[in-house]
Image: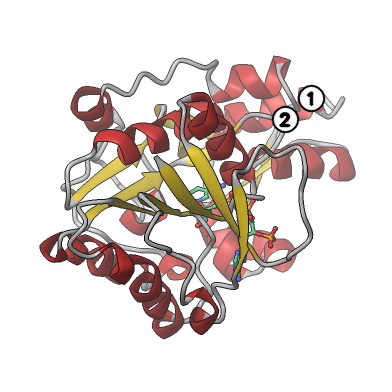
Amino acid sequence: MKVLLTGATGYIGSAVTEHLIAAGHQVVALTRSAEPQPGRGWHAQVVGDTADPASLDGAVTPDIEAVIHLAPPSGDAEVDTAVIKALATPLRGTGHPFVYTSGVWVLGATGEEQEVGERAPVNPIDIVGYRPRIEQRVLAESAEGVRAVVVRPAIVYGRGGGIPAILVDRARTQGAPEYYGEEGVRWPTVHVDDLAELFVAAVERAEPGTLWHGVGEPAVPVRDLARAAGRAAGVPADPHVVPVEKAAEVFGALFADALALDQSVSGAAARTGLGWKPGRPGAVAEIGAGSY
Ligand SMILES: NC(=O)c1ccc[n+]([C@@H]2O[C@H](COP(=O)([O-])OP(=O)(O)OC[C@H]3O[C@@H](n4cnc5c(N)ncnc54)[C@H](OP(=O)(O)O)[C@@H]3O)[C@@H](O)[C@H]2O)c1
């Protein structure tokens, strides 16, 4: 397939590019900058800015057979809705896939429940407050002849990047590992290469109107991630928990709330429904002995 990919230069987008190409697809990267990026293996590059939906007009040419939208939300619901319209409307009536990237933070704190699935009600934290509405806007495209699909990644790790890299950086600069919120906080996690394979599976075979959690491990104690981060940073001390109000002084209130979010989320449906087989090392092992 010829796949238009937004966010193609990013952390997840770089891995998705590689896995799409390995699976025999062609990547047309939508980038903000016109600067060519040789070595990425893109079939073509088109310029567009998701903060300016009008700039996306014409990006989805008739030869595009799939769109994966990975660029982050702008923070303005109207703009992001207009982006969905600009990218999905040209696919109407074609049956071609449109895969939208959301995230597990739309579920909010999962409380006593273990490994919540895709049917759990949303309860978004403020940083992703309107994202469930965008998910619904995307899924509604399945009534218009688009194979509309939503993927909600967990906290992504691997290749030395993602949010876990923040734990490593903080341990290094603070001289001791730390994590945020309450002592027992847990994060669902997914390796970036496993997640990229889920995007390939979604674009190849997810049914219209479906939503999938991209979760490798449902609930990793962040204390264990922080301990591994400390070792990776050369400060193998016991991690200490930073109250969310203190974390807000460093990260801002919205992101601090996200870092302190306690979740247990299942990724079982994508394994059975899409044949997804996440098999990379777990997050603690990867941070401790891998790329960080
Ligand atoms: N990382 C995680 O743990 C995680 C978890 C759940 C969900 N997600 C979601 O996954 C998506 C990708 O995340 P990521 O971690 O890969 O982010 P990232 O590394 O920050 O990459 C963002 C990508 O989007 C592009 N981009 C940013 N603003 C843009 C704009 N206005 N117009 C066009 N392109 C723009 C960037 O391109 P430039 O080269 O131009 O900067 C870059 O390619 C986001 O929607 C994020 O919310 C991430």
Residue 181, percent across and down?
Answer: 55, 51
Amino acid beneath label 1: Ala
Amino acid beneath label 2: Ala
What's the mark number on residue 134?
none
Residue 24, percent across and down?
Answer: 46, 27
Compare residues 178 and 128 and report the one nearer the observer: 128
Task: Note whether residue 265 is visible.
Answer: no
Compare residues 151 and 43 and report the one nearer the observer: 43
Q: Is residue 264 above or below residue 256?
A: above
Q: Is residue 38 above or below residue 35?
A: above
Q: Which element is circle 2 on?
A: helix
Residue 51, percent across and down?
Answer: 56, 78
Residue 106, percent across and down?
Answer: 35, 58
Q: Quadrant of ligand 1?
A: bottom right
Q: Is residue 281 left or right of residue 201?
A: right
Compare residues 80 and 222 and report the one nearer the observer: 80
Q: Is residue 201 above or below residue 109?
A: above
Q: Is residue 89 above or below residue 24?
A: below
Q: Which element is circle 1 on?
A: helix
Q: Is residue 228 left or right of residue 157?
A: right
What's the mark number on residue 229?
2
Q: Identify the residue position indicated by label 1 in the image.
A: 232
Residues under numbered marks 1 and 2 in contact, where contact means CB atoms less than 8 Å apart: yes
Q: Residue at x 39, y 67 (%)?
A: 87
Q: Is residue 162 left or right of residue 184?
A: right
Task: For marks 1 and 2, give the CA distance.
Answer: 5 Å
Question: How crowded is the residue under tag 1: few (<14 C-alpha within 10 Å), some, or many (20+)?
Answer: many
Q: Residue at x 45, y 47 (%)?
A: 3
Task: Note whether residue 109 is visible.
Answer: yes
Q: Is mark 1 within 8 Å of ligand 1?
A: no
